[in-house]
Image (cartoon, grey):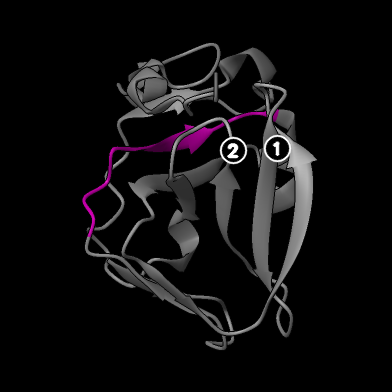
Amino acid sequence: MKGQCRCGEVTYETSRDPVFSGYCHCHACQKRSSAPCTGFVMVPWEGSTLSGETRTYQDLGGSGQPVVEHSCIKCGSLVLMELKVLDNIVAIMASTLEGPNDFIPESHVWLSSQDKRFEIQDDLLKQQGPPKQMALYLARKPV
């Protein structure tokens, strides 16, 4: 999988297979994208590359753990997010993917925050909170 920001200054590449992909309806994603939901693909980041200068912004995710956003300093496009609650997993913004078949959504998540003006008309799995499939990747806390 490859992708880039809007201006092409920030690029990424990963050979890792997605572990989850979907649409997030949380309030943070609504604000960061100015849209009712955001498409994303989650992949293990080990062995992947991010090139170009990014600006980072740290916020708290729905888990209460940090989320670090990486955006291009030139065009401002959000490229990916580090989800500290998950072990070595990043969320790549579907809008930055190069391949049209790299985004195959499985589910809608955080529907508890859904913009009620946005009607979902697909048959994807609907989850009120975070993707349950990601429980396997919860970050290991040191003892």
The residue labelled by disc 2 is: 84
The quadrant of the picture occupied by the N terminus is: bottom left
Q: Measuring 67% from the left and 50% from the top, which residue is drawn there?
A: 68
Measuring from the top left, give residue 48's x and y in whole percent.
Answer: 35, 66
- In the image, taking residue 44 as reference, residue 109 lies left or right, namely right
Q: Which residues are magenta?
A: 16-26
- In the image, taking residue 88 as reference, residue 6 lies left or right, namely right
Examine the structure image and report whether residue 54 is included in the region drawn in magenta: no
Within the image, what quadrant is residue 24 found in?
top right
The residue labelled by disc 1 is: 66
- Element at label 2: loop
Query: In the image, what residue type sits under mark 1?
Result: Pro
Q: Measuring 23% from the left and 56% from the top, which residue is drawn there?
A: 16
Q: Residue furthest front?
A: 143
Measuring from the top left, give residue 117's x and y in whole percent.
Answer: 68, 26
Measuring from the top left, give residue 11's x and y in whole percent.
Answer: 46, 79
Q: Measuring 47% from the left and 26% from the top, which residue is drawn there?
A: 140
Vertical order, 117 against 46 (above or below): above
Please tell me how crowded label 2 is: few (under 14), some (14-19), or many (20+) other residues with Cα within 10 Å: some
- Element at label 1: strand
The quadrant of the picture occupied by the C terminus is: top right
Q: Is residue 20 visible?
A: yes
Vertical order, 126 against 107 (above or below): above
Q: Is residue 121 visible?
A: no
